[in-house]
Image: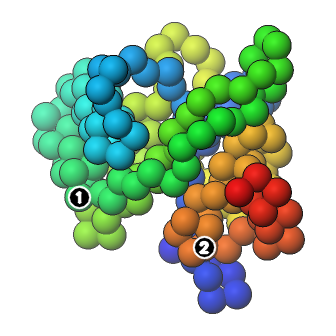
Amino acid sequence: HETFESLPIIQVGLLRNNQQLCLPWYLTDHREDCDFQDCSANVIRGFIQRRLTNLFEDKHQVQSMLISLKTASVSIVYTGYITDHLNADHAWIEGVLFNIHENEEHPFQEEFLQVFLEAETMEQVFWMNVGRLTGIRSSHDELLARIALHRGAFYSEALAKRQLYQIS
């Protein structure tokens, strides 16, 4: 993993669709009694597990990726409102931001990112080292700063302080 000024640089999976970058995001339906802590993490793990088993035919590859997911640290970075400029009325959505941090002994395979692609779209997905603004959706830049702060990683400090302390 790369570092800058002795701090790690986060690496995130990003989607590109129509020349725009964004973090993978999904609308999910869950039980009414689902809490943000345990239940939400289980919903996202279950979603990824189902996608892995449906996408890949090679059982050994699927098993390897499931081990990577099982040994990964899944933590909630933020719960709350996110300004969503793609929403038709420029409103907000209520979101849960997860950090899925790979276990160095069982790293994610490159193909793992395919779980985040929607079926039959022209999207691309790739890993990107992020230590500054990336030109992604503005609400997602804010989320990247939150992930970096959560992981103790480098992120454009002036920007991160300005964004996070205004909304915290």
Sort mark 1 into few (<14), some (14-19) or many (20+) by Cα contacts within 10 Å: some
Q: Residue at x 64, y 58 (%)?
A: 146
Q: Could you say which is closer to the camera, residue 36 or residue 20?
A: 36
Residue at 21%, 44% in the rendered image: 66
Q: Mark 2 points at which residue?
A: 153
Location of the C terminus by quadrant is bottom right
Toward the bottom, the furthest residue is 6
Give left or right: position of 130 versus 72: right
Residue at horizontal 82 percent and vertical 45 percent from the top: 135
Residue 28 — which label? none
Q: Tell me the SS state at disc 1.
A: helix
Q: Can residue 129 be seen in this view?
A: no
Residue matched to label 1: 71
Query: Which element carries disc 2, helix, strand or loop?
Result: loop
Query: Residue 34, can we see it?
Result: yes
Up the image or down, 146 lies above or below 51; here it is below
Q: Position of residue 138 (x, y in %)?
A: 80, 41
Residue type, mark 1 in image:
Thr
In the displayed structure, 62 sits above or below 31; it is: below
Identify residue type, mark 2.
Ala
* Disc 2 residue crowd, few under 14, some 14–19, many 20+, Cα 10 Å: many
Identify the colour scheme used: rainbow
Q: Residue at x 40, y 31 (%)?
A: 115
Choose top left, top right, bottom left or bottom right for residue 62.
top left
Residue 91 % position (x, y): 77, 22
Residue 163: name its quadrant: bottom right
Is residue 77 or residue 123 the one in the foreground? 77
Q: In this view, does 78 lie to the left or right of 83?
A: left
On screen, residue 107 above or below 20: below
Residue 31 image position (x, y, % from top left)? 30, 20
| Structural distance between the alpha carbons of marks 1 and 2 | 21 Å
